[in-house]
Every structure is written in structure tokens, then in C-alpha cells.
Image (cartoon, rainbow, N blue to C red):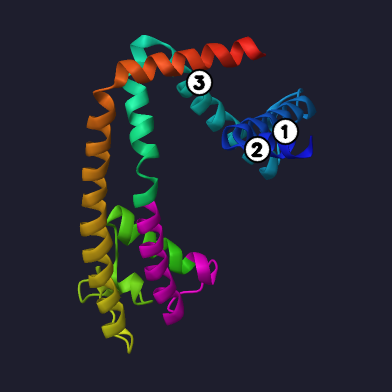
């Protein structure tokens, strides 16, 4: 009897349902405690409500898979994202390598050493957004000109200049250009594959949805 219970609890979909019910309970509790108005909500309560609202929107989106007008287009997207999980593991490990290398250089420490290393590498790797001065741990300064106007003045290179630029070129070339473009191709291929069987996926999903409601 114990093993079937654990198999039920550790099922991924059931874990999502349990987490959703827990979040529903927290959200309803916050609403009840502040039923007179939102004026006295603290930061933690606002964070709970923000997460609850976001999850509810995603739940509604997922329920649309049971309607033909949406399901035949929505399901190929969901299945394509699911089959990209293995590729995302490669991206995560590559990003971790860049973050760890930048962390060891120790160029920034605010608001925390890890986050100060993670954020610029994430921006560079995934978003293609970067500032070489920021990566080097320096910032331009404003210098007053003869006419009274202020103009930006670039800082001098630091002793970490070569290390930072080497890490920049490797990360930009390997992750930003290489892996991100490959990710677009992988998603496109997966979507085309599942889009050709969208009717079968929709029928299967609708049957599963009906069976889950019938079981309850």
C-alpha cells in the first residue's frame, strides 16, 4: 500500500497538482486575511498573490488544449517544448560553466556574489545583452567638459581585461550565437514533427481530459 502512494505522490503531474492546491490555499488565506482591502498587504503576501495569479493564467491556458479551436495549435507547441528538455540541459551546463568562471574572477559582489556573477552571464548568454565595462567590474564616469557639459569617460583596462574578454568571446560565440540559434532550429523541427500529428494529439489529450474529470 505504501509504494502505490509514493508512486502517486512522486508522479510529475500529481506533484504539479499538489503544488497548485497548496498555492491555492495560500492565496485564499491571504485574500481572507485581507478581505477588508489590499492596503495592509506585506511584501510576502503580495509575492504569494503574484505567483498565484501567474499560475492561474497558465492553468487556464493549459485547459484550452481540450478545445479544438486551440488544442490542435497549442499541443504541438507544448510537445515541442517538452522534447527540447535534453537540449536545455546542454544550455544549462554551458551557462553554468560561464557563471562559474566569472564567479571565480570575483569582479562583482553586489547584491550577492553568486547573483552578481549569474545575471551578467545570463544576459550575455541567453539575451545577447552585455556591457564589457560591467563585465570587467568597472563603470564609465561623467567628466565635466570646458563648456560645463558632462561627457562619459571610459575607464582604463584592469588587470582582468584579457580574462574577461576571453570569457566574453567564448560565451558569446558558444552560447549566444551557437546554442541559441541551434535552439531555434530544434524547436522548429520538433514543432513541425508534432504539428503534422496535431489531430491525433488533440484526440488523445481530450480523451485524457474527459477521463480525469470522470475519475473525479
Q: Image point 46% across, 13% down: which residue?
A: 206
Horizontal and vertical percent for residue 117? Answer: 44, 69
Q: Which of marks 2 and 3 is nearer the N terminus?
A: 2
Q: How far apart are marks 3 and 1 (CA)?
A: 19 Å
Horizontal and vertical percent for residue 106? Answer: 46, 80
Q: Image point 24% across, 64% down: which residue?
A: 174
Quadrant for residue 204, please give it.
top left
Q: Earlier in the sequence, mark 2 or mark 1?
A: 1
Question: Residue tagged by mark 1?
Answer: 26
State if disc 1 and disc 2 touch (CB < 8 Å): yes
Left or right of 116 on screen, residue 190: left
Question: Residue tagged by mark 3?
Answer: 60
Question: Residue tagged by mark 2?
Answer: 48
Q: Distance between the residues labelled 2 and 1?
A: 7 Å
Neighbour tally class for label 2: few under 14, some 14-19, many 20 plus, Cα within 10 Å: some
Q: What element carries label 3?
A: helix
Q: Quadrant of the C terminus?
A: top right
Horizontal and vertical percent for residue 198? Answer: 30, 20
Left or right of 131 on screen, residue 122: right
Q: Give the range drawn in magenta.
A: 88-115
Amino acid at each position: 500500500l505504501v509504494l502505490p502512494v509514493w508512486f502517486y505522490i512522486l508522479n510529475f503531474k500529481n506533484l504539479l497538482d499538489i503544488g497548485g492546491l497548496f498555492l491555492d490555499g495560500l492565496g485564499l488565506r491571504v485574500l481572507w486575511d485581507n478581505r477588508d482591502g489590499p492596503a495592509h498587504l506585506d511584501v510576502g503576501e503580495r509575492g504569494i498573490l503574484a505567483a498565484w495569479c501567474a499560475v492561474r493564467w497558465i492553468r487556464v491556458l493549459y485547459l484550452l488544449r481540450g478545445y479544438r479551436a486551440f488544442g490542435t495549435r497549442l499541443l504541438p507547441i507544448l510537445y515541442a517544448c517538452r522534447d527540447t528538455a535534453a537540449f536545455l540541459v546542454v544550455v544549462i551546463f554551458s551557462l553554468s560553466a560561464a557563471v562559474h568562471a566569472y564567479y571565480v574572477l570575483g569582479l562583482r559582489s553586489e547584491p550577492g556574489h553568486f547573483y552578481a556573477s549569474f545575471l551578467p552571464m545570463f544576459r550575455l548568454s541567453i539575451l545577447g545583452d552585455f556591457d564589457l565595462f560591467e563585465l570587467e567590474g568597472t563603470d564609465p564616469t561623467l567628466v565635466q567638459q570646458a563648456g560645463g557639459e558632462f561627457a562619459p569617460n571610459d575607464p582604463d583596462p584592469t588587470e582582468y581585461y584579457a580574462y574577461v574578454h576571453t570569457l566574453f568571446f567564448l560565451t558569446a560565440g558558444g552560447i549566444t550565437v551557437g546554442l541559441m540559434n541551434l535552439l531555434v532550429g530544434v524547436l522548429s523541427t520538433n514543432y513541425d514533427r508534432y504539428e503534422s500529428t496535431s489531430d491525433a494529439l488533440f484526440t488523445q489529450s481530450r480523451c485524457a481530459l474527459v477521463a480525469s474529470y470522470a475519475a473525479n
